[in-house]
Amino acid sequence: MTFILKGDWPDAECMDCEKKGVAFRHWGPLAPAGVKVLNCGECWAKRQEYYTKHGAPKSLPVHEFFAVTVGPESCSLYRVADCQAAGRLVVEKIGLKGQGGAPVGAELKGGNLVGITRVGLQLYKEDGYPFMYQENGRPFSGETIRRQQAEELNVAHWGGGTSPIVALFASKGAAENCLQQENLRPCDERWHMETAVVLRAIGETHQTFIISTGKLRLPFEW
Ligand SMILES: [Zn+2]
């Protein structure tokens, strides 16, 4: 069923760009299944373009996910949130099992991007040439600029990081449950499905959460 309401809601936030001012409330072909989407005029047009090109609705941007990580003596749970409207990135430890490492409440610092890599979550900054970056010698053909990945930069551009990732989750409850399990391993196959869902939702063109696809790629298919 399709539902499109055109109007003017100046105080509502567009669910794609998070700016105030909504012109369309809709579900149907332009919205992910089961979701009623609020859009400004500009993002509505972008959704139409995307649908025409791909024959499927553009997914909603991911602004938060949870990561369980495993170090030598402890396992941790992190909340990663990209508060785009507030211009702030939060990578905060919200759970800990075992000894050592940073306490609950500690925040990682030292970057405006979060790399999702084989070695862990890695905060970093680009080296100043993100818009000139080309893939395989050709300009990137995605719909937005492709950010540089952590492994494409000298580690001098890296900030705080975590131990290797066990799994990624969209919900805090599922992540807490994972943290309580025994024998957690890097990229644990017990949660490949949950991790894949998060990775696919983030996609290749997220402007803050950057999945490594080179030598720091997570060692499984999604
Ligand atoms: Zn918008």
Image (spheres, helix red, strand yellow):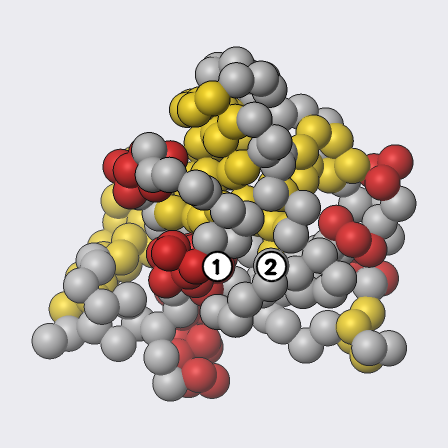
Q: Quadrant of residue 212?
A: bottom right
Q: Residue at x 82, y 55 (%)?
A: 152
From the viewer's side, name the closer residue of 110 and 87.
110
Task: Evaluate if marks 2 and 1 touch, with contact meaning CB atoms under 8 Å apart.
Answer: yes
Q: In the rendered structure, find residue 199 and report the number of the disc placed on it.
A: 1
Q: Secondary structure at mark 1?
A: helix
Q: Amino acid at mark 1?
A: Leu
Question: CA separation, marks 2 and 1?
Answer: 10 Å
Please state if 58 lies on the left or on the right of 212 as rendered: left
Q: Residue at x 67, y 33 (%)?
A: 161
Please state if 10 lies on the left or on the right of 95 as rendered: left
Q: Residue at x 38, y 85 (%)?
A: 55
Q: Secondary structure at mark 2?
A: loop
Q: Quadrant of residue 34?
A: bottom left
Of the two numbered discs 2 and 1 in the rendering, the one whose residue sits closer to the viewer: 2
- Residue pushed farthest left? 1
Q: Quadrant of residue 32?
A: bottom left
From the viewer's side, name the closer residue of 102 and 62.
102
Please state if 141 lies on the left or on the right of 180 as rendered: right
Q: In the rendered structure, find residue 218 and report the number of the disc placed on it.
A: 2
Q: Amino acid at mark 2?
A: Leu
Please state if 68 lies on the left or on the right of 177 as rendered: right
